[in-house]
Image: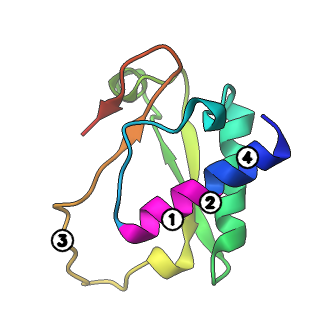
Amino acid sequence: MTDQQIQSASELLWTLWHEGKRVPELPKTLLPATRAEAYAIQARLEERSAKELFGWKIAATSQAGQAHIGVDGPIAGRLLAEHVYPDGAELAMGANYMCVQRRNSPPHGT
């Protein structure tokens, strides 16, 4: 991916995230082909954050978890401080949606 494609992908994801919208997949020109490209897009999301990075999360640490979302190893994600809630906060999870998609495969989501 070019630097401009990485920037455009991060801008689109940021906008969708903050408007509560989804798309079935990124436009083909903005789909990362490698894990490094995907992490580069994620880094740009952190740059847009109004606060410092809160921490990291890791997913798909087991083979079963990896198979469930269609990845070949654990994946890391940034936790942005403006999306961290205090202990005891009650959150509505009805709009929660997760999707990881490999090229040439149907989306896996819950």
The residue under label 2 is which amino acid type?
Glu
Q: Badge 3 is on which residue?
A: 92
- From the viewer's side, name the closer residue of 12 and 101: 12
Mark 3 or 1: in front is 1
Mark 4 or 3: in front is 4
**Residue at figure coordinates x 16%, y 61% from the top left:** 94
Instruction: Mark 3 and mark 1 in contact? Answer it, CB < 8 Å.
Output: no
Upstream in sequence: badge 4 or badge 3: 4
Residue 15's label in the rendered image is 1
Question: Helix, strand, or loop for circle 1?
Answer: helix
Upstream in sequence: badge 1 or badge 4: 4
Instruction: Mark 2 and mark 3 in contact? Answer it, CB < 8 Å.
Output: no
The residue under label 3 is which amino acid type?
Ala
Question: Helix, strand, or loop for circle 3?
Answer: loop
Upstream in sequence: badge 2 or badge 3: 2
Residue 77 in the image: above or below residue 86: above
The residue under label 1 is which amino acid type?
Thr
